Image (cartoon, rainbow, N blue to C red):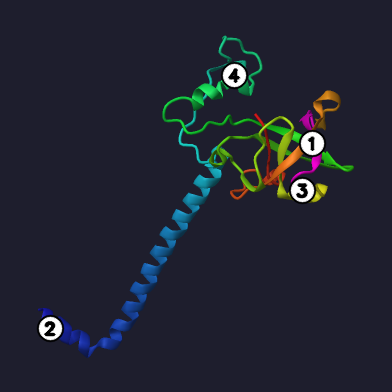
Amino acid sequence: MFSITIKLMKKSARMLIPAGIAILIGTAFIAATFLFSNSMDDSLRRQTTAQLGEANYIATMKTNSNGAVSENGSADRTTVADFNLDRIRATKGVKGARVDTSVSVSISAAGKRSNGYAVGTSTDRKLLPVRIVSGDQPVDNNEVALPKSVAKQLGVGVGDKVDVAPISNGSALSGTAVRDVRVVGLTSDPFGVYSFYGGASVLSE
């Protein structure tokens, strides 16, 4: 039977060309579909989880109807200190920890102003939702890392001073809320997590 099939194929080889083309097109279509779906899945996963950096685990505080509850059981406003990062980082097996905090800020320098978004820093760069592309991440309260676009808009670079103030009800707070800080780094947002804001600044804990 096999020998007969081979003889028939040799005799009518031209008739096999359309079938071969159809098989080739079908295979290419299926391969392209799988490639597109896998690329889309990977892109969505990266964008969805990018705000968590390269963290392996997420821990949350107890909450109630009034918001996050601190250790003493009150529903007071939660601060970074309430998360006891030093104790978490000292836990066996933990290489780094970061509180996922964010705030709308107004940044100004030399008469220029830019409203944007800021996130908390981390001792481990891998846990940051943005990338530090120049300089370093903030260490104390007088330092900030700005998105490259914001730094360009304000005409500042690493080592320059800017005024940073939180935004409340759409307006930047004034007075003691304004901090004169030094730019220690520039950031990029490779996964577009904060693309609506032109990237995100990084502030100290």
- Residues shaded magenta: 158-170
Is 201 magenta? The answer is no
Amino acid type, callout 3: Gly
Q: Which sits earlier in the primary sequence, circle 3 or circle 1?
A: 1
Q: Single out the mark in the foreground, 3 or 1.
A: 3
For the residue carrying disc 2, how many other residues have a C-alpha within 10 Å: few (<14), some (14-19), or many (20+)? few
Separation of residues labelled 2 and 3 (CA atoms): 79 Å
Label 1 belongs to which residue?
106
Q: Which sits earlier in the primary sequence, circle 2 or circle 3?
A: 2
Choose top left, top right, bottom left or bottom right for residue 25. Answer: bottom left
Residue 66: percent from the left, percent from the top?
A: 62, 15
Residue placed furthest toward the left:
1
Label 4 belongs to which residue?
82
Q: Main secondary structure of the magenta part?
A: strand
Separation of residues labelled 3 and 4 (CA atoms): 33 Å
* Callout 4 secondary element: helix
Q: Look at 80% across and 26% down and name the residue there.
A: 177
Label 2 belongs to which residue?
4
Q: Tell me if residue 42 comes above or below residue 51 in the rendering.
A: below
Q: For this rendering, which residue is in front, 192 or 174?
A: 174
Amino acid type, callout 2: Ile
Residue placed furthest toward the right:
111
Choose top left, top right, bottom left or bottom right for residue 14. Answer: bottom left
Q: Look at 49% across and 37% down and name the residue there.
A: 55
Amino acid type, callout 1: Ser
Q: For this rendering, which residue is in front, 42 or 139?
A: 139
Label 3 belongs to which residue?
157
Q: Look at 60% across and 10% down and name the residue there.
A: 74
